[in-house]
């Protein structure tokens, strides 16, 4: 059995309709998975898959990693969290994050101003609103007058914060209930733990492509890395982690508009450290290292390239350990 008491998977699965997830949720529990974690980027929203899971499989813990602090008004965000907390009492973890300029500004037409402050203010407001009290809240990011939830939250959900660097990491563990990590290696987890301490709850999305075809894994991995790590927040994160020299050629080529070169100059070792690949046994060993280094809730994101989903879920699950 895996050494972590909780073991998660990212949903929804590509190529499977939301109604068809009902049977998959039951399979996940039977395989030993304890958590399903959604996201909110450019697919379905972060709450709908969890609402279905809450109704269909009461044995699963639910989490969202993450909901942007900008794209819903504070009161609507509190209402949505309260609804899912009522649907799955004691089983829901809400993940709040800054998101990115692309998602907030380009796609949603909302100014991406002072992201750390917006996350900090939103977290403080949610604590008050979810407690059920009438809230008058004034902050640098927004002002709320006279809001009160009409349906009190009986079991308070955990509020995690997506964090990439020390300031946000400290906020996540000092004022939040834990930190959400993304796009880091198992060894990078130690750098995070040096900031937050060994007792801080940490969940990490771990990208897994179970294939022994290294060329395929690195081809897919390079495309994923250029899509994410050219976003400024992630670039700064990897500079902080000490990966700046390895990725500088990619950033320079990307900035110059040379997408082909940007892909080519990413070192193999960077791809292999950020995208778990290899045999199922090798993948399991690499996932275990995240837990050994401080991740309390591993959240696998299986990359659906040339794999059988049921086989991958089975072979990567706690049931085979």
Image (spheres, helix red, strand yellow):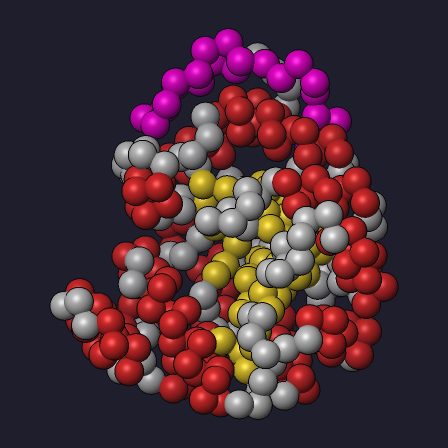
- The relative height of residue 5 versus residue 39 in the rendered view (above or below) is below
* Image coords of residue 173 (percent x, y): 52, 48
Q: Identify the image quadrant of residue 293.
A: bottom right
Q: Would residue 47 be counted in the magenta stretch?
A: no
Q: Residue at x 36, y 64 (%)?
A: 227
Q: Is residue 284 left or right of residue 251?
A: right
Is residue 295 visible to us here?
no
Question: How many numbered tags mark residues here?
Answer: 0
The residue most toward the right is 30
Is residue 262 visible to us here?
yes
Q: Is residue 69 left or right of residue 254?
A: right
Q: Would residue 140 be counted in the magenta stretch?
A: yes
Q: Residue at x 64, y 40 (%)?
A: 48
* Image coords of residue 239 (percent x, y): 29, 68
- The relative height of residue 160 versus residue 27 in the rendered view (above or below) is above
Per the rendered image, the range of residues in magenta is 135-156
* Image coords of residue 270 (percent x, y): 39, 80
Q: Residue at x 59, y 47 (%)?
A: 64
Q: Nearer the viewer, residue 201 or 317?
A: 317
Task: Name the quadrant of the C terminus.
Answer: bottom right
Q: Nearer the viewer, residue 15 or 158?
A: 15
Q: Residue at x 40, y 85 (%)?
A: 269
Q: Is residue 175 left or right of residue 292?
A: left
Task: Name the quadrant of the N terminus.
Answer: bottom right
* Image coords of residue 86 (percent x, y): 74, 30
The residue most toward the left is 256
């Amino acid at each position: 059995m895996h050494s972590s008491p909780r073991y998660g998977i990212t949903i929804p699965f590509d190529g499977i309709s939301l109604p068809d997830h009902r049977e998959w949720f039951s399979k996940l529990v039977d395989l030993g998975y304890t958590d399903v974690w959604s996201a909110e980027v450019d697919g379905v929203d972060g709450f709908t898959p969890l609402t279905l899971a809450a109704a269909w499989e009461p044995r699963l813990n639910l989490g969202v990693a993450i909901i942007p602090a900008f794209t819903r008004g504070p009161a609507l965000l509190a209402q949505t969290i309260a609804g899912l907390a009522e649907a799955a009492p004691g089983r829901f973890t809400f993940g709040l994050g800054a998101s990115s300029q692309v998602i907030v500004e380009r796609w949603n037409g909302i100014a991406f101003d002072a992201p750390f402050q917006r996350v900090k203010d939103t977290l403080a407001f949610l604590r008050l609103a979810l407690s059920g009290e009438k809230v008058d809240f004034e902050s640098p990011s927004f002002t709320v007058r006279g809001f009160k939830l009409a349906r009190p939250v009986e079991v308070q959900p955990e509020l995690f914060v997506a964090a990439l660097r020390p300031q946000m990491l400290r906020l996540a563990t000092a004022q939040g209930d834990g930190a959400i990590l993304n796009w880091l290696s198992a060894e990078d987890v130690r750098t995070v733990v040096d900031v937050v301490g060994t007792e801080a709850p940490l969940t990490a999305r771990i990208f897994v492509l179970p294939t022994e075809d290294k060329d395929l894994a690195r081809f897919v991995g390079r495309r994923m890395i250029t899509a994410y790590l050219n976003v400024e927040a992630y670039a700064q994160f990897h500079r902080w982690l000490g990966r700046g020299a390895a990725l500088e050629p990619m950033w320079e080529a990307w900035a110059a508009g040379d997408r082909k070169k940007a892909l080519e100059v990413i070192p193999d070792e960077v791809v292999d450290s950020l995208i778990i690949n290899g045999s199922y046994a090798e993948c399991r060993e690499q996932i275990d290292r995240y837990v050994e280094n401080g991740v309390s809730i591993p959240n696998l994101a299986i990359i659906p390239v040339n794999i059988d989903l049921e086989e991958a879920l089975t072979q990567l699950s706690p049931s085979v350990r």
